[in-house]
Image: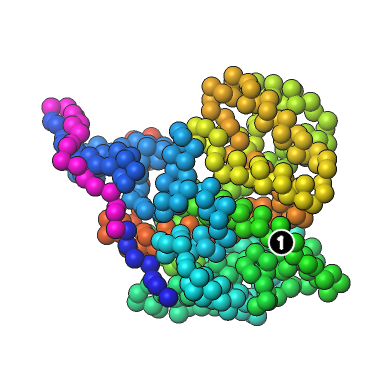
Amino acid sequence: MEKYTPPVNPGRIDDTTAELKVGDSTLQLPTGAGASGEKFIDIRALRRETGYIAYDPGLVNTAIAKSEITFVDGGNGVLLHRGYPIEYLARECVFLEVAYLMILGKLPDDEERQRFSQLMNRNSMIHEDMHTFFRNYPEHAHPMAVLSAMVVSLSSFYPEFEKSEEYEPLDITATRLLSKVRTIAAFSYKKSIGEPFVYPSHRYRYCENFLNMMFASPVNDYVVDPVVERVLNLFLILHADHEQNCSTTVVRTVGSSDANLYASIAAGICALWGPLHGGANQAVIEMLQKIHDDGVPIATVIKDAKSKNSRTRLMGFGHRVYKTYDPRAKIAKETCEQLLAHLGVQDDPLLEIALELEDRALADPYFQDRNLYPNVDYYTGIAYRAIGIPPEMYTVMFAIGRLPGWIAHWLEMKSDSDQRLIRPRQIYTGPESADVASRSAV
């Protein structure tokens, strides 16, 4: 089994420079471009040469790394993983193949695919002592809280990872996490509904195994629908990676302190939990459900969303990067409609609300001018709901899908000679000097 190798095309530094004038001095800053032409200015010498630092809240104009994993062109709605368009991967691959691509840099051949699948099954069990953790969680603990805690606890049950002097081979790092995370996720769901755990089985494929662990029980011989299995594969692929998003940056930040992979991934899971990031898919379905339950006309929803005095927001609309229709959302929408038709769901009120809301929003100049299009979160929740996955598990599904990207970025960060402990600067705005003389003695 191959190991991760560093990037071979990390971008280039041009002969040209950018000039920055500070007072009477002029600083020459190197410029360069990435593999797809995105331009950058190297400001590493800025503070050393001028005493100034860059102020960039949210790091929206700052590249923290060079990466060969994912390319996003938000203006044209393009998403590439290792050069492969997301449309191709969603149509032609299963999730494990994309995970292999993310981590090892290529799509597997038949032999590699079979080997990878076998390793997944071999590493799918979790230590029996971890069941004690599950039993002691409150019955209605959020699955994301359980998932993050259980992932970081893996370092206690498998401490040999931290003792390794070099990167562990793929069958120890990637497969252990990729395989055990779905088991932990399914167990957390079973715990929340008071049902016994269903163990993984060597007879099933990756997504098939997860669905069986979620929905089988001693009184229900659950049979996995191949269409549902395919939909789950596709949705996990759509979430596999998305460049330097919030949670990926957290994984890289924690990893830069030389923390182990489990700790870094657990931190990424916590970041993903936020409603402005991965938690948005749960927020979308809750919004649609509230519109339905309250009988709010779509015209009123649109009006309130545009009002400055209203707290109404259209969840699932808009994206920090995309200024056009999210390419993942197009695939999710088609897939959702096909799934509901397959399952015989003729009139899903939430889908009808979602479709009408999208049509009205896209025809409204307010949303057009602000480039507010549906993102990947908008339709995934409706599909998960049809499968039987509850809203509190939606972000967990996102985390399972994003895991290959997190692992790939962690490995890439570790091999990058330019990377250092991530330690941003700040602009201090507090008092210059506290009046300690006037404070009476205690």
Q: Is residue 221 above or below residue 319?
A: below
- Left/right placement of residue 306 relative to residue 195 reads left
User: What range of the chain is rendered magenta?
Assistant: 8-24
Q: Decide: few, some or many residues near mark 1? Use Cα within 10 Å; few <14, some 14-19, many ≥20.
A: few
For the question of whether residue 223 can be seen, the reply is yes
- Does residue 376 appear anywhere in the picture? no
Quickly name the residue at label 1. 226
Q: Quadrant of residue 96?
A: bottom right
In the image, is 300 to the left or to the right of 182? right
Q: At numbered mark 1, what does the secondary structure look like: helix, strand or loop?
A: helix
Give the image location of residue 366, x and y in percent.
59, 20
Q: In the shown orientation, is residue 29 left or right of residue 37?
A: left
Inspect the image, locate mark 1, and give the three-letter code of the amino acid beneath it.
Pro
Q: Where residue 35 sits: x, y (%)?
A: 32, 46
Residue under the point 42% across and 46% down: 71
Query: If the image is split into quadrants, where does the N terminus sit?
Result: bottom left
Number of residue marks: 1
Q: Is residue 160 left or right of residue 344?
A: left
Q: Residue at x 63, y 38 (%)?
A: 316
Give coordinates of residue 331: x percent, y percent: 60, 44
Quick one: 179 or 269, which is closer to the camera?
179
